[in-house]
Amino acid sequence: MNKEIQLLIKICRTNKLEFSPDELAALLNLKFREGVYPYLRRLEEQNFLAKESRRTYKLNEHNEKVKIIKFLLNLFGNNADILFSVHTQRILERFSANPLLKASQLPHHNLKKIRDIARKTRIIHTTREGNSDIYFIRSWEEPVKKLLDFFDIKLKFDEDAFKNYIIKSYSAFTGKQAHLVDEKQQELAKLNIQYYLEGKDFILNKLKNIESTETAILDILTKEKLKRFTNPFEITKKINEWKIKYVYNTDKIEGNALTFEEVTTGLTKGWEGIKKEKKDILETENSKKAIENIFDTAHELTLDFIKLLHSITQQGIDENAGNYKAEENCIIDSNGTLVDNTTPMQFVDERLKDLIKWYSENEKRFHPFVLASIFHNQFVYIHPFSDGNGRVSRLLLNFILIKHAFFPVIIYNDEKHKYYSALRQSKDGDIKQSIIFLSDIYRTQLELF
């Protein structure tokens, strides 16, 4: 990475707009201020910086390449540094002519760099065919497009034809897997692969409308509510009442047949005399056990914690409890109609790791309600488990709120259509309706406590 680009990236990371020469020299760890001026002149020539006065330089936020740097920094964090080097530029130029290359077709000295790019950012994707590693760029995805624009690289191949080739290649591989004996599973696998390769299961690189005026009032209301709690027995009583309402509604959304009265009786007095399907009772008991974990703020939001919540919610119901889906699935409505495809099973671990990484890098950047909404919605689009995804997603949403000193919320069964509508509107990265929905129910439900 040349020094002026390194300086530009450091400037973008500060989230400041104006800098003195001394500050800019410090960003490059230069001992003397004079050493920074050659880099500043080159940044001025390229319209990245403007000289405001003898003592001030200003970042040009309207420059398209500045926008690209900020976008990729927000998406990949510290791993984005690898993308702005001359080596990466040369690698992308090679892939712009031939988007799919075997390891044997690449210079040996480039392979480590290519593997690092694939592992840290997935600008380049890797797979195996027989004993060979194969690398390709998903040129139709937004991060790849932006990086190509940054380096002014034009594609020299038919992008649509290449995308269709990749989809067919993955589908052919998926169709050969032993468990996909059912034609519907094979067709679903093909659709999920296409969905994944087009990035439709991933909203983190498309986020917009993530700031909301709704959240400021929530901070005030929460602080006021917390001041009213002086009696610990009152708090315990309120929380126990909340848990029963939560369990009933989170399970009801997924089709559980138990009434609220039966759930209340079963969880407080026992299930004797309640003649309902064993699965319905197990779901209720499991949901109650899972809730205890989200109130334990010693937990951290990790893959193991997500698997733990799933294991508890599906205990005795799903023999694969706590493990990723072993068959392809999709999101359907109450009539069994396809609403959305989901992440293919072989890419679930990749997508969840990206989500966990995004959360850890943005936990302090976003308001907890924004953070919880984005995490919940992205988790649903991944749909990592064979069943129980909705229950786990709502547990995770509340865990994030509780972890950040907010009260948990109940998504009531009779509001599930509003809930689903807000969720679907985030498919293209527009998170506004989900934040509004979550904020509205929070303000209403504060009276529960």
Image (tube, rainbow, N blue to C red):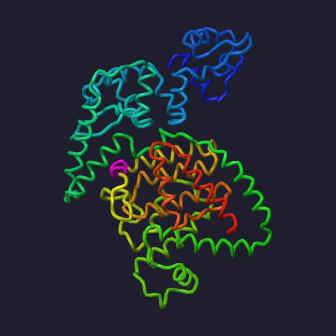
Q: Image height check: is 74 above or below 371?
A: above
Range covered by the magenta-colored residues: 341-347
Residue 19, by quadrant, is: top right
Query: In the rendering, at what x and y percent does residue 184 appear?
Result: 23, 57
Q: Quadrant of the C terminus?
A: bottom right
Query: In the rendering, at what x and y percent does residue 288 appear?
Result: 54, 73
| Residue depicted at x 62% and y 12% | 40
| Residue depicted at x 57% and y 86% | 269
Query: In the rendering, at what x and y percent does residue 59 appear?
Result: 63, 20
Residue situated in front as seen by the camera: 116 or 71: 71
Q: Is residue 344 magenta?
A: yes
Query: In the rendering, at what x and y percent does residue 44 appear?
Result: 60, 11
Residue situated in front as seen by the camera: 336 or 270: 336
Q: Image height check: is 164 above or below 57?
A: below
Residue situated in front as seen by the camera: 116 or 265: 265
| Residue depicted at x 48% and y 39% | 206
